[in-house]
Image (tube, rainbow, N blue to C red):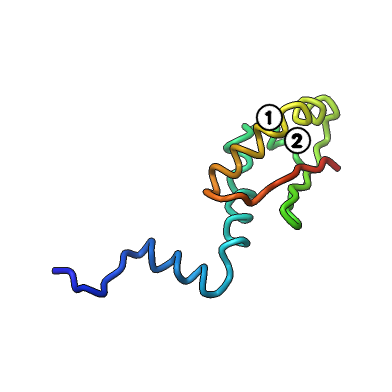
Amino acid sequence: MRKPNDVTLKDAIGKMLDVYRLRRKFDETSILAIWPEIMGTAIANRTTQIYIHDKKLFIRIESSVIKNELLMVRQGIIQKLNDHAGSIVITEMVFL
């Protein structure tokens, strides 16, 4: 039997992330963790460094050919990553 003040675990965790101002960092971490799944193993294996700073995704890729291909589809990648997070976490991609 549910009581009137019961909340689901999902809602409780969401409220906790908002209260402690951890939502943005949580979303950034989830994007970094999902990178290999979204981009595939070929690109993930050639990615040597990836981090987010000030809503910019910084990526270091060994292959110049892959880097060039990713430059052309940059907006699509940003859209996929933001869709996964459920909010706008990344606004720009920078290749190192």
Q: Using a 10 Å C-alpha cutoff, classify the residue at mark 1 as few (fewer than 14 neighbours), some (14 to 19) or many (20 or more).
A: few
Percent x, y of residue 84? 54, 44
Task: Locate residue 72: give its quadrant.
Answer: top right
- Picture residue at 75% right of the left edge, 44% below the top: 92
Give the residue at mark 2.
46
Percent x, y of residue 9? 35, 65
Task: Locate residue 65: give its quadrant.
Answer: top right
Number of residue marks = 2
Say if mark 1 contacts mark 2, CB within 8 Å.
Answer: yes
Instruction: Tell me the amino acid under the disc marked 2.
Output: Arg
Q: In screen coordinates, is 10 left or right of 56?
A: left
Quadrant of the rendering where the N terminus is positioned: bottom left
Q: Using a 10 Å C-alpha cutoff, classify the residue at mark 2 as few (fewer than 14 neighbours), some (14 to 19) or many (20 or more).
A: some
Question: In this view of the protein, which residue sits in the foreground, 18 or 38?
Answer: 18
The label shown at residue 42 is: 1
> Disc 1 versus disc 2: distance between alpha carbons?
7 Å
Question: In this view of the protein, which residue sits in the foreground, 53 or 42?
Answer: 53
Percent x, y of residue 36? 62, 39
Q: Is residue 66 above or below residue 53?
A: above
Percent x, y of residue 88? 61, 49
Quadrant of the rendering where the C terminus is positioned: top right
Q: In screen coordinates, is 90 left or right of 80?
A: right
- Picture residue at 70% right of the left edge, 32% below the top: 43
Q: Secondary structure at mark 2?
A: helix
Instruction: Tell me the amino acid under the disc marked 1.
Output: Ala
